[in-house]
Image: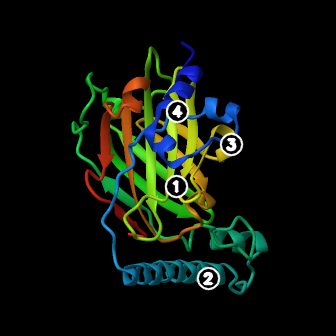
Amino acid sequence: MNSRVARQLALLAVPALVATGCSAASSDDAVAGPGMSDLAPSYDSRPAQHRDEAKEKAAGQRDEGGARARGSGHEAARAPQPGESPKTRGQRNGDGGSTNAAPAASASAPRPVTVRDPSGDVGGGVEQAPASADIVAVSLRRRGDVVEVRTTFAAAVPSRQSGSKGMNVASFYDVDDNGIVDYEVWASLADDGWGTGHLDRRQEKATFGPSTGIRVSVEGHTLVTRFSVVRIGGADVFRWSAASEWGSYESMASSTSARDHAPDDGAVDYPG
């Protein structure tokens, strides 16, 4: 069976989508996307003041980064020394000749948050999952309007999946501290490579393929997923977690796939 058709069949069988009435943007996009399963966890709800504290912390990190950037810019534009050419002055300032070096775009971004996960803790499944499905670390950071999630595994990440098996890697976002995942960002591996999917649980809408704007790349043992912050409602403060699953499309649809969550329970805060 063609992998795209298999993924479409898996999608149609997934309770997580059927129960919420989610629908894909188009049939072509649905075919190109993953068969989303019920991999998403639930978290403990928290009082509203925690979000206020987290927002203050995020603002403090941005202010701290902005101050560093402004300091660097001021130093770069210092007055010339006697006998110093513009080129020499620029080299001393580290800007290649410009006397007005712009601060890096990421200078005011909060620091990345990393979750370490023990190896060998993939659970479930009727077959033993490969080490390439075993998460050992996940790092998330926001740079401007782009969120980057780097999921590292115990073995090299494959670029294609042979046979009748598939693999999903997802990250989940609770943006209002009520313990319910609001947004899901998916990458799905089949024999034709990595596809993408997005689930907006607030709007009960799923989109797949290029229309998601999600970009996936493989860097050795790490799968890198990048997407617009719009995909998580523009939030700069949230709770998140990640997970992977491996197995047949039927096992993903029936919740019997091999799975690994990071962290194993609960969620982590961003900013950390």
Label of residue 27 in the image: none
Q: Earlier in the sequence, mark 2 or mark 4?
A: 4
State the CA–CA distance, disc 2 to disc 4. Answer: 49 Å
Q: Residue 158, image x and y in percent?
A: 45, 27
Residue position marked by numbered label 4 in the rendering: 11
Q: Is residue 156 visible?
A: no
The residue that appears at 38% across and 43% down in the rendered structure is 39
Q: Secondary structure at mark 1?
A: loop
The residue that appears at 70% across and 37% down in the rendered structure is 26
- For disc 2, the neighbor class at 10 Å (few under 14, some 14 to 19, many from 20) is some
Residue position marked by numbered label 2 in the rendering: 70
Residue position marked by numbered label 3 in the rendering: 25
Quadrant in which the C terminus appears? bottom left
Left or right: 263, with 59 as reference point: left
- For disc 3, the neighbor class at 10 Å (few under 14, some 14 to 19, many from 20) is some
Q: Residue 196, image x and y in percent?
A: 57, 39
Q: Residue 168, image x and y in percent?
A: 44, 35
State the CA–CA distance, disc 3 to disc 1. Answer: 14 Å
Residue position marked by numbered label 1 in the rendering: 201
Q: Earlier in the sequence, mark 3 or mark 2?
A: 3
Q: Is residue 199 visible?
A: yes
Q: Residue 179, image x and y in percent?
A: 37, 64
Circle 4: residue type = Leu
For marks 2 and 4, give the one nearer the viewer: 4
State the CA–CA distance, disc 1 to disc 4. Answer: 16 Å
Q: Choose between 42 and 68: the one closer to the eye.
A: 42
The residue that appears at 36% across and 27% down in the rendered structure is 251
Looking at the image, residue 237 lies above or below residue 79: above
Circle 2: residue type = Arg
